[in-house]
Amino acid sequence: AKLAAALKGSGKHVLLAAADTFRAAAIEQLQRWGERVGVEVIHQAAGSDPAAVVFDAVKAAAARGADALIVDTAGRLHTKTNLMDELAKLKRVIERQMPGAPHEALMVLDAPTGQNGFAQARMFHEAIGLTGVALTKLDGTAKGGIVVRIVRELKIPIKLIGVGEGVEDLQLFEPEAFVDALVPGE
C-alpha cells in the first residue's frame, strides 16, 4: 500500500490486488490500507485461488485504465517449492493477459533478514525474474548489508527503502546515503 500511495501521489491511477488469500485477515488488512491511501483493492473471498484474483485484477486494471496494478502476494519461504511455483504461476497469468507485463517484480526484503536474504533473493529471481528489491525495516538497528551481495552477485538493483511504518516512509533508494549509513565515515 505504501508503493500504491507513492504512485498515486505522483498522479498515477493505481489498483491493488489482494492475492494473499490464505493468511488470516490479509485481505481485510490490504483493504484497510487501500482505503487509507485511496486506492481500490481487487479481491475475492479468503481461501480463493490467488491466480484467480490476479486474473480478475489484471482485467479490472485494463477496464479502469489503471496506470499500475500492484499485486500483494503471500509471504513465502524460498524453500517451499509449491509456494515458489505459485508465484511463477501468478507471473504467467499476468503475462498471458498483458504481454510484456509485469513491468516490475519487486521483492520486499526486511533489513534484519541477514544472510538468508541472499538465498531468498536468488530463489525468487530464478522463479520470476526480479527487477528490484524494496529493503524495509531500516528504521531499526539493522543496516541491510546483505543487499550489497544481492546487487553484486545477482545484479538485482535496490529500488526502494522503508524507514518506518507510515505511508510516507517508503523512499527511493539513494546509494550514497545507504553506503554512508552502512559504513559511516568521518
Image: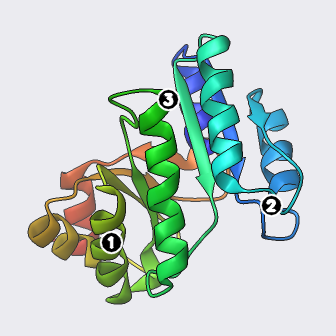
Residue 165 shows up from this direction: yes
- Which is in the foreground here, disc 2 or disc 3? 3
Q: Relative to 107, is 36 on the left or the right?
A: right
Q: Disc 3 designates what residue?
A: 97
Residue drawn where x is 76% and y is 35% of the image: 42
- Which is in the foreground here, disc 3 or disc 1? 3
Q: Disc 2 designates what residue?
A: 26
Q: Amino acid at mark 3?
A: Gln
Which of marks 3 and 2 precedes in the sequence? 2
Q: Secondary structure at mark 1?
A: helix
Q: Secondary structure at mark 2?
A: helix
Residue 138 shows up from this direction: no
Residue extending farthest to the left is: 152
- Which class describes the residues within 10 Å of circle 1: few (<14), some (14-19), or many (20+)? many
Q: Residue 76: name its quadrant.
A: bottom right
Q: CA distance from mark 1 to mark 2?
A: 23 Å
